[in-house]
Image (cartoon, coloured by chain):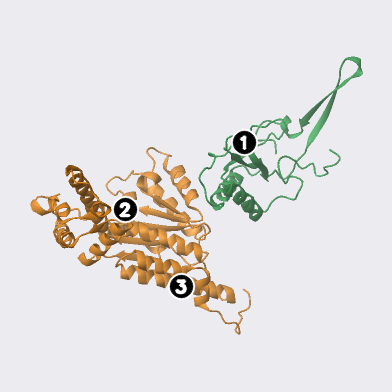
Amino acid sequence: MSAVDLEARVSLSEILREARVTEVLEQLDRDLVGLTPVKTRLREIAAFLAVEKARNGLGLASGAPSLHMSFTGNPGTGKTTVAQRIAEILHRLGFVRKGHLISVTRDDLVGQYIGHTAPKTKEVLKRAMGGVLFIDEAYYLYRPENERDYGQEAIEILLQVMENQRDDLVVILAGYKERMETFFRSNPGFSSRIAHHIDFPDYSTTELEQIAVGMLERMQYHFDAAAARAFHEYIERRRQQPHFANARSVRNALDRARLRQASRLCSSSVPVDAQALSTLTERDIRASRVFFDANRSE
Amino acid sequence: MMTNHGARLTQGQFSFLPDLTDQQITAQINYALERGWAIGIEYTDDPHPRNTYWDMFGNPMFDLKDAAGILKEINECRKTFPRHYIRVTAFDATRGWETPRMSYLVNRPPIEPGFALERQEIEGRAIRYTVRSYAAGKPESERY
């Protein structure tokens, strides 16, 4: 081991600034509404990585930190989006070499017949080397009801690479909370190899409204005052119904509202201006199924 | 083969240099990946210069971003065929090229007996030359 330099001083904020990590974190704050626990955790990880880098620079012991993570949370809470940002942060701090994100599900890892799984999984792992491997709905890998399921084989290969090639790739498992917990219970190997368990909370109605406004802004649309009120009510009602998927439901609702706006504009013979083309009115929102058959599912 | 004392095989790039280290191989692979070339690993125990088609180890590797995965595959191949010649080729699929752009050895047998030059006397005292690998006289898998 090299001698520890006791005199040297390192500026951690310098490291973060130099790697332009602060920039990514700030952008994350701006772009993603809510998610406070996630953002706090990301800051902690970024800080930890900076410290690790500084220790390395001064010759203090710094084992390659285990960076595998699990993201749990309901659908539409921003797991994939955050994974992309993590890849960026890890790349900027130099903990992954290329910083790309490979997003896969069970289909990409598990084969259809004997001897098909290992090459398939290895192929995906090879593609993910130097970046981040994001496994969505990871619990589908493990099917306890079928003991000859090939998922187990994929799990074993994954575990081996997660352990032996920690410098080469970071694995992020994602999925719904309860099912992920069952998955970790039946595969203790995974649980112990994952250092960061991050839980994504559901969005509050206000947060979803903010998200909606942000989405509309990016598409150059806006609500009029009545429509904004109607949309608040829409979210409240939609929450109570099954298959509510947070931000994804909001995006779908907005897409449908845009459809209704389009057909409303086309059916009238009056010439339209830019203002009319970019305004969603109360009628476009209130026409949704959510308002008149609230007690029927979907 | 007077100019090549150890009778080391000199095919492809870097073959007159000492064997590449894994770090150097990684750098070469990264060079190819940056240019979007597909990497293949090939092996043979018949290194005759006219034997261009070697056996492929696994599939050619497309869409990779980092050399770590390929190096792993190379090591796997070295484990399976420790006494064979192994080379890495980088294929450029760009229209107009469509050909390997790089090819270099990453593994060679511990002892390389080299090649014999055979002279056949034909009509009018003319000579016909043939290059024959000493190792290729033995059956496959016993050559090195």
Image x and y of residue B54, in percent: 63, 34
The answer to whether residue B27 is above or below residue B138 is: below
Chain rendered green: B
Image x and y of residue A129, in percent: 50, 53
Chain rendered orange: A
Q: Is residue A71 left or right of residue A170?
A: left
Q: Which mark is residue A139?
A: 2
Helix, strand or loop at disc 1? loop
Q: Are marks 3 and 2 in contact (CB under 8 Å)?
A: no
**Nearer the N terminus, badge 3 or badge 2?**
3
Residue furthest bottom in the image: A7
Whether residue B4 can be seen here? yes
How far apart are the alpha carbons under marks 1 and 2?
A: 45 Å
Query: Between residues B106 and B133, which one lies in front from this camera angle?
Result: B106
| Residue A24: quarter of image | bottom left
Q: Residues within 10 Å of mark 1 (few under 14, many from 20)?
A: few
Task: Give the residue pinned by disc 1.
Answer: B97
| Residue A195: quarter of image | bottom left
Q: Are marks 1 and 3 in contact (CB under 8 Å)?
A: no
Residue furthest top in the image: B123
Image x and y of residue B90, in percent: 61, 42
Q: Which mark is residue A48?
A: 3
